[in-house]
Amino acid sequence: MNCNQFNSISLEEVLQILGHLPTKQTEKEAWFLNPFANENHASFKINKNLNNWYLHSEGIGGDNIDFMRKYLNASVKEVLEWAENQNFSSFHKQNFHNQKLENLLKNYEIIEVKEIQHPALLEYLKTRKVENQTAFLKEIHYQMNDKNYFGIGFKNDSGGYEIRNKYSKICLGKKDISTIKNSSENVKIFEGFFDFLSFKNIEKLLENKSSDYIILNSVSMILKIKNSLENYEKIDLYFDNDEAGNRAVEMLKNEIENVEDCRELYSDFKDLNDWAMSSTKMEEKLGGSLVQKVPKVYNKRGR
């Protein structure tokens, strides 16, 4: 990817991938909280027609390259290297140098899908403390740019796979949410599938009622699911403890009834999986199990 190609990608999509959602928008522009610093009022504006940005609080602006150089504090080369590893849908829709659209969309080939067997993947799952939840996962072998790779695959609703291993974090196919239905009136929503798998490990400690599950696979997908939540009696959110997670929780609580922020369970950690991975080390430090916190938190909420 070169500078012209990256600058032609929707800046809105770039911000969504980074976890920044608009506070308001029209057909011509979108407003965000400052992505570079904390603020209470949105001062970062995107001109959708020109695909550029302007930060009113600092009086600066530019194109995608300018934004990512400041955001990553990186060189142009490093920005383009970062962009190459993203799965921009707006990039795939373009037709550079008269290449066929099908060739742009099919830049990989899945060679094999099977149960997880590779020792490296099993060890990776063990480090993430979810080695006993392989029923939700597949071992994916794929080829990209004439090179062979393999990783843990978590399937989404569009047939794509979130791929993870010790070195990679990509999506093969269309980016989408993953939905697990149990004909329940309650739903639990997670940002990533490792958070979901961590939850499954402690679920029996929390409650016996069945639930539906939605795994966003990216906090930017929150806009896609809003309308599908209206029929649920209870909506539990297990988002990250960061600015993007805070904004997503606030948006859903303001627009939908019966939404509960469940992050108190892992309030001292980045996310639910980070809490699970830290449990052994913290147990040694505190002399007790973090899992003991689970029933206490839920009893306090009247579960």
Image (cartoon, grey):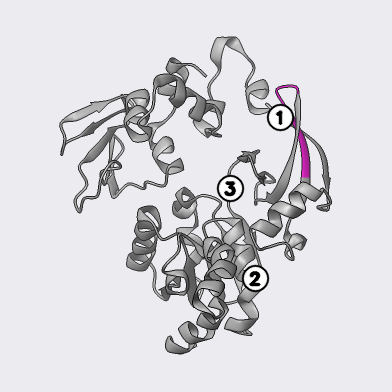
Q: Residue at x 44, y 52 (%)?
A: 223
The circle drawn on residue 108 is: 1
Q: Quadrant of residue 74?
A: top left
Label 3 crowd (10 A; few <14 / some 14-19 / many >=20): many
Residue 44 position in % (x across, y down): 24, 39
The circle drawn on residue 197 is: none
Judging by the rendered image, the residue that carries numbered circle 2 is: 200
Judging by the rendered image, the residue that carries numbered circle 3 is: 176
Label 1 crowd (10 A; few <14 / some 14-19 / many >=20): some
Residue 103 position in % (x across, y down): 67, 21
Magenta-highlighted residues:
140-146
Q: Can residue 183 be spotted in the picture?
A: no
Residue 71 position in % (x across, y down): 34, 35
Q: Secondary structure at mark 2?
A: helix
Q: Is residue 131 left or right of residue 169?
A: right
Mark 3 or mark 2, which has the lower sequence index?
A: 3
Q: Secondary structure at mark 3?
A: loop
- Distance from Cα at disc 3 to Cα at disc 2: 21 Å
